Amino acid sequence: MKSTRKGLRDGDLIKDTYERLNCADCDQVLKKENDPDEVFSVRICPECGERFKELR
């Protein structure tokens, strides 16, 4: 699982005009899952299911 910063650098993610993270393949806004036991959140594309981790 890549980080969101690496996904932006590699072109897997793009930001829209409101600074939301979008999947570059599906053009869908990523959803966020918070696990209270982890140091990071997981961002998931609802269309293709690709997952990225994001430090809080």
Image (cartoon, helix red, strand yellow):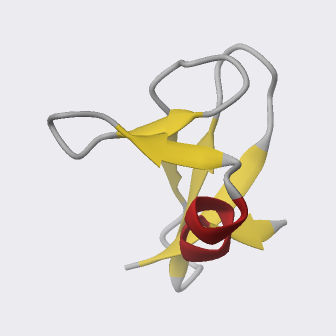
- The relative height of residue 21 versus residue 26 in the rendered view (above or below) is below
Circle count: 0
**Which residue is outermost to the left?**
18
Q: Residue 34: x and y, percent?
A: 48, 57
Where, by quadrant of the figure, is residue 23 drawn?
top right
Please provide percent x and percent y for residue 22.
49, 34
**Residue at image point 49% right, 44% down:** 14
Quarter of the image that includes the N terminus: bottom right
Is 47 in front, or is 11? Answer: 11
Q: Quadrant of residue 49?
A: top right
> In this picture, is 21 found above or below 53?
above
Relative side of 4 to 50, left or right: left
For the point 54% across and 74% down, the residue is: 5
The quadrant holding residue 29 is top left
Query: Residue at 22% of width from left, 46% of height from top?
Result: 19
Where is the C terminus found, in terms of image quarters? bottom left
Task: Judge by depth and name the residue closer to the eye, 17 or 54.
Answer: 17
